[in-house]
Image (tube, rainbow, N blue to C red):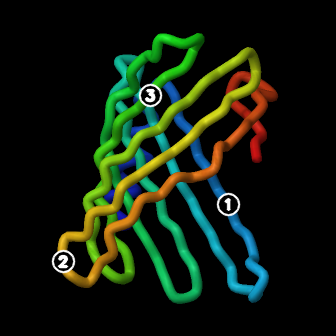
């Protein structure tokens, strides 16, 4: 899996747009949640993505490919992505969808995914991330919540 992430980062040098998302948080019971994600999009809309997610008793590694498509509203885009995910409990196939809208320097992104386990050990589940909002501070940097 480490080699797959290295390949993604090497490929990223050739892509038109690259995004890295890093999060660390502590829950009420003092356990730590961490996430590192990457999305790279070529000028023709071809998209590659990868992430790692860690918690004390659980870990996921995901890789995916997709195609960014324009949406009929403002500067919005929709990107269907097919993910392969290796988790602590199983391997999953996860059709996913990313919606992104840009209004000036403000970006709003919503992510949804359906996890389909490849064995009886996994759990079918639907994930809908809360909206992420970011503000573009320079040509290559934005700050978000």
Residue 45 x/y as whole percent: 37, 23
Give the side of residue 113 with respect to residue 94, left or right.
right
In the displayed structure, 90 sits above or below 70; it is below
Mark 2 or 3 closer to N-term?
3
In the displayed structure, 1 sits above or below 72; it is below
Question: Secondary structure beneath disc 1?
Answer: strand
Q: Quadrant of the N terminus?
A: bottom left
Front-most of 134 and 114?
114
Of discs 2 and 1, which sits in the foreground? 2
Q: Residue furthest left?
A: 119
Q: Marks 2 and 1, Cα distance to the nearest angstrom?
A: 30 Å
Q: Residue at x 60, y 36 (%)?
A: 109
What number is the disc on residue 78?
Answer: 3
Of discs 3 and 1, which sits in the foreground? 3
Front-most of 97 and 4?
97
Question: Secondary structure beneath disc 2?
Answer: loop
Q: Which residue is mark 2?
A: 119
Q: Marks 2 and 3, Cα distance to the nearest angstrom?
A: 30 Å
Mark 2 Cα shell of 10 Å, populated few (<14), some (14-19), many (≥20): few
Q: Marks 3 and 1, Cα distance to the nearest angstrom?
A: 23 Å
Q: Residue at x 53, y 35 (%)?
A: 18
Q: Which residue is mark 1?
A: 23
Mark 1 Cα shell of 10 Å, populated few (<14), some (14-19), many (≥20): few
Q: Residue at x 67, y 43 (%)?
A: 132
Mark 3 or 1 closer to N-term?
1
Give the side of residue 119 with respect to residue 15, left or right.
left
Q: Residue at x 25, y 70 (%)?
A: 117
Give the side of residue 102 with respect to residue 66, left or right.
right
């Amino acid at each position: 899996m480490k080699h797959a992430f290295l390949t993604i980062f090497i490929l990223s040098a050739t892509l038109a747009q690259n995004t890295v998302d890093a999060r660390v948080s502590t829950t009420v019971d003092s356990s730590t949640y961490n996430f590192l994600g990457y999305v790279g999009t070529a000028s023709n809309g071809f998209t590659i993505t990868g992430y790692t997610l860690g918690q004390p008793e659980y870990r996921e590694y995901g890789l995916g490919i997709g195609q960014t498509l324009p949406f009929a509203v403002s500067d919005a885009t929709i990107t269907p992505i097919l993910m392969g995910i290796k988790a602590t409990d199983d391997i999953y196939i996860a059709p996913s969808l990313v919606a992104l809208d840009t209004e000036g320097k403000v970006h709003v992104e919503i992510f949804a995914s359906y996890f389909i386990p490849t064995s009886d050990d996994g759990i079918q589940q639907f994930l809908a991330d809360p909206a992420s909002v970011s503000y573009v501070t320079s040509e290559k940097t934005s700050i978000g919540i």
